[in-house]
Image (cartoon, rainbow, N blue to C red):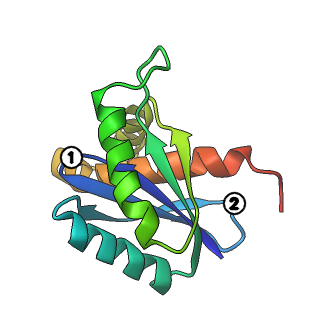
Amino acid sequence: MRIMGLDIGEKWIGVALSDPIGILATPLTRISATPVEQTVETINRLISDNDVSRIVAGMPYSMDGSTGHQAQRVQDVLDILAPHVDVPIEICDERLTSVAAERRMMEAGLGRQKRREHIDATAAAVILQGYLDQQPSP
C-alpha cells in the first residue's frame, strides 16, 4: 500500500505517492485547493485509485518552530479533510521544502514555466520523501 504526500497551498495542493514498499516518493499531480468539497472528492478518488494507506501532509511551521497564519490554514484544511477520508493523516514539518523542490527542478533543467506547473507536486514529493526516510526499513 502506498503513502500519499500533500503540500497544501492557497490555490493548489501538490500530491505525491510512495512506491508500494514505502522507499521512494514521486510527484503525482497538483489539484485545486478550492472548492473544498471538490478537493475532498479528488483526494478520495486518488486514495482509492492508488491503494493509499496513509496521508502525510506538510505543515509550514515558522523557522522558529511556531505555527503561523499559513500553518493554521493548512490545519483548517486537514480538519475538513480528516472526517471524509478512511486513512490516517500525519503531519510532517515542511520548512524549506519549496526551496528544495525548486532547486531540484532547476538542476533537472526545467524552465520557469515547467517549474511553476510542477512545484506543488515536487514539494509534496520532498515532504513525503523526508517522511519515508525517517521510517524504519521495511
The answer to whether residue 78 is above or below residue 104 is below
**Disc 1 designates what residue?**
10
Numbered label attached to residue 121: none
Q: Label 1: how many residues lie within 10 Å, few (<14), some (14-19) or many (20+)?
A: few
Q: How crowded is mark 2: few (under 14 residues within 10 Å), some or many (20 or more)?
A: some
The residue singled out by tag 2 in the image is 23
Mark 1 or mark 2: which is in front?
Answer: 1
Residue in the image at 54% along x and 45% along y: 91
- Residue 66: x %, y % from top left: 45, 20
State the image coordinates of residue 9 (x, y, percent, origin top left).
27, 46
Query: Is 105 above or below relative to 25?
Result: above
Residue at 30 percent of width and 56 percent of height: 13
Which residue is found at the position 56% from the left and 70% from the top? 87
Q: What residue type is labelled 1?
A: Glu
Quadrant the N terminus occupies: bottom right
Residue 110 lies, in percent from the top left, at 29, 50
Snapshot quadrant of residue 112: top left
Residue 64 position, x and y percent, is 47, 14
Taking the image as shown, residue 17 lies to the left or right of residue 69, namely right
- Chain-order first, disc 1 or disc 2: 1
Identify the residue at the far front of this view.
83
